[in-house]
């Protein structure tokens, strides 16, 4: 991953960590948000969606989930 940080386009790269919640969500054919909305994978997906929305010039909800 270190080489990735040296690429000029890497500022647009978001990584989603491996997570059991992602595996479960795929098996259930559901969103990781429905499986484990407070987990690290769900937060990474939220961050990715915010970044894509920002780069595309689209609005997104500024929500803070209760833990």
Image: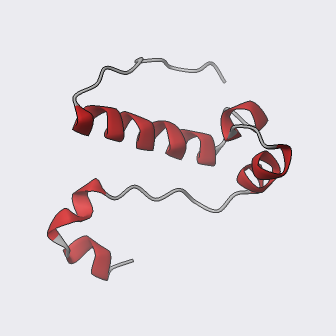
Q: How many marks?
A: 0
* Vertical arrangement, residue 1 with respect to residue 57, above or below: below
* Quadrant including the N terminus: bottom left
Residue 55 x/y as whole percent:
23, 39
* Residue at image location 29% in from the left, 82% down from the top: 3
Q: Quadrant of residue 8?
A: bottom left
Q: On screen, 50 above or below 13?
A: above
Q: Position of residue 19 (x, y in %)?
A: 70, 57
| 16 with respect to 2 (left or right) | right
Is residue 40 rendered to the left or right of residue 60? right
Q: Position of residue 49 (x, y in %)?
A: 43, 37
Question: At 20% from the left edge and 64% from the top edge, which residue is drawn?
Answer: 9
Asked whether, in this view, residue 46 is left or right of residue 9, the answer is: right
| Location of residue 62 (image quadrant) | top left
Residue at image location 50% in from the left, 20% down from the top: 64
Which residue lies at the image location 66% right of the left edge and 24% below the top edge?
67
Q: Please, which residue is most extreme toward the bottom here?
A: 3
Q: Nearer the viewer, residue 39 or 16?
A: 16
Looking at the picture, the colour scheme in use is secondary structure
Residue 51 appears at what percent x and percent y?
Answer: 33, 40
Q: Which residue in the rendered view is the most extreme toward the left?
A: 8
């Amino acid at each position: 991953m270190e080489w990735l940080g040296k690429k000029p386009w890497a500022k647009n790269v978001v990584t989603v960590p491996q997570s059991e919640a992602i595996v479960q969500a795929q098996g259930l054919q559901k969103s990781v948000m429905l499986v484990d909305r407070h987990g690290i994978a769900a937060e990474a997906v939220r961050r990715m969606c915010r970044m894509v929305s920002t780069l595309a010039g689209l609005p997104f909800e500024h929500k803070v989930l209760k833990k």
